[in-house]
Amino acid sequence: MRTSNIGYCDYSGGDLNFVLGCTAVSAGCANCYARRIYERFGKDFSKVTVYPEKLARLLKWRPKPPYKRGAGSRPLAFVVDMGDLFHKDVATNIIRRFLVLVWDRPDVDWLVLTKRPKRMREELLRWCATTPPLPNLWLGVTVENEDNLWRIDELLKTPAALRWVSMEPMLGPIDMEPYLGPVHVDSLGVRPRNNWDYWRAGLDWLVIGAESGPDRKRRPLRWDWAWDVLEVGRREGVPVFLKQDSGPHPGVPLLDREGQEVKEFPPYQAWRFRDREGKAS
């Protein structure tokens, strides 16, 4: 497994892409980098393919430090960055196998990102009927503009130890203030943020990034859109990761108002797991 070029994780690609392919659902999909890669090789990105053998190999995978969060931390592994784990063409048993993998590999923090939060909510509610929320599973949604704020609403109703939002590509101003800090979610009420036995309230991490690619197709990012979210995050104590600015190639630094890079992560938690009978391990 190779280390990742994605700034906010240690690993991506390879066996972590046990689902490949996706179909467009919103404006953020228009210039999808994964689809561009597929089309370059004459492949049909709309055909979703699952590779169970990759999941099996991940059980034996042994990552090696250093990790981006520093000494003593776990690696961050971003799964299915070339597709969507909660696409309708991914069978429930594959999602279930992934959740079992997360349970069996507490030495890794697993990042999931989806544009299909309704199905994610359904699958995680089913899992949590018999098993607590997984403390090393970071559940996230993509919100490229305010037309898709509903995805955050679904995320906040999903049992999770950590919730994050990726605003990439950020295509317009997004008011994130209502989603930070204590948030009342249905009848569950405000939940404590220091105990993984309970579902958390609010968001825990924000990632902001612009679109890259040819000038004629690339949709620009206005810096004040990103800065407004950064300031709200700082005011509410939610870490923010500025991933990349607009440019012909990925990786152009996105800077704050003072011209500095901002690469914050949620506070590291040395979670203790509990077995299915509730005993600490």
Image: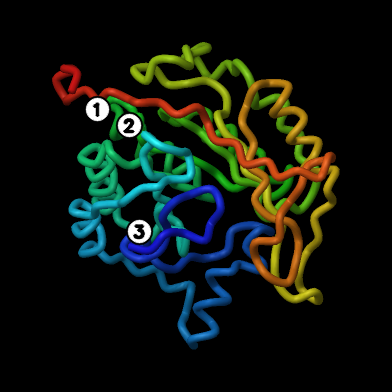
Instruction: Identify which residue is drawn at 57% across, 16% down.
Output: 184
Left or right side of 257 for 122: left
Instruction: Identify which residue is drawn at 24% across, 51% down.
Output: 93
Which numbered dot is residue 16?
Answer: 3
The percent position of residue 125, horizontal first and vertical second, equals: 35, 31
Q: Amino acid at mark 2?
A: Leu
- Residue extending farthest bottom: 42
Q: Amino acid at mark 1?
A: Thr
> Please, what secondary structure does the residue beneath circle 3 have?
helix
Contact (Cβ within 8 Å) of mark 2 with mark 1: yes
Local crowd size for mark 2, using a 10 Å CA cut-off: few (<14), some (14–19), many (≥20): many
Is 67 located above or below residue 137 in the figure?
Answer: below
Which residue lies under the disc numbered 1? 131
Is 157 located above or below residue 240 in the figure?
Answer: above
Q: Which callout, 1 or 3, points to the residue nearer the camera? A: 3
In front here: 116 or 138? 138
Instruction: Identify which residue is drawn at 77% across, 30% down.
Output: 231
Q: CA distance from mark 2 to mark 1?
A: 8 Å
Which numbered dot is residue 134?
Answer: 2
Q: State which quadrant residue 230 falls in.
A: top right
Q: Amino acid at mark 3?
A: Leu
